[in-house]
Amino acid sequence: MSDAEESKPILDPLSARPLYVQLADIITKKIKSGELAPDRPIPSENHLAEEYGVARLTARRAAQELRERGLIVTVRGKGSFVVAQPPTDTPDGGTAD
């Protein structure tokens, strides 16, 4: 087993948290750590589904969750990309300008 496989986060299908939220959280951590750089693509839905052993629809819903969080943008025909300037949370729950 390679180091990448050993350190890859595991999704918990028995958790009360939906799999798509768990997957979105994993990708969020990769964005915040710099593993996924700004203005660079995230793995495709097919790749995420295969890598984490989930349905493509689950990967698609995770991407939607990341768009709602303001962490990625999707360009039709090109894929999804990490935003250049991720939003910062403010105490009122909104995003800073």
Image (tube, rainbow, N blue to C red):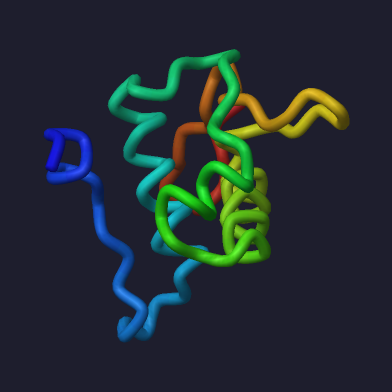
The quadrant where residue 82 appears = top right
Q: Nearest the camera: 1 or 61?
A: 1
Name the outermost residue toward the front: 1
Which residue is at 39% across, 52% downward?
25
| Number of marks in picture | 0
The N terminus, quarter of image: top left
Q: Does residue 62 appear to the left or right of 21 in the view shown?
A: right
Residue 18 image point, x, y percent: 47, 75
Which residue is at 75% across, 33% downward?
74
Q: Is residue 59 visible?
A: yes
The quadrant where residue 23 appears = bottom left
Residue 61 image point, x, y percent: 64, 60
Which residue is at 66% across, 55% downward?
60
The C terminus, quarter of image: top right
Residue 37 image point, x, y percent: 45, 16
- Tell me if residue 18 comes above or below residue 88 in the rendering: below
Residue 77 image point, x, y percent: 86, 28
- Tell me if residue 68 comes above or below residue 78 in the rendering: below
Q: Nearest the camera: 60 or 87?
A: 60
Q: Is residue 92 visible?
A: no
Q: Nearest the camera: 93 or 7?
A: 7
Which residue is at 51% across, 16% downward?
38
- Tell me if residue 89 comes above or below residue 53 in the rendering: above
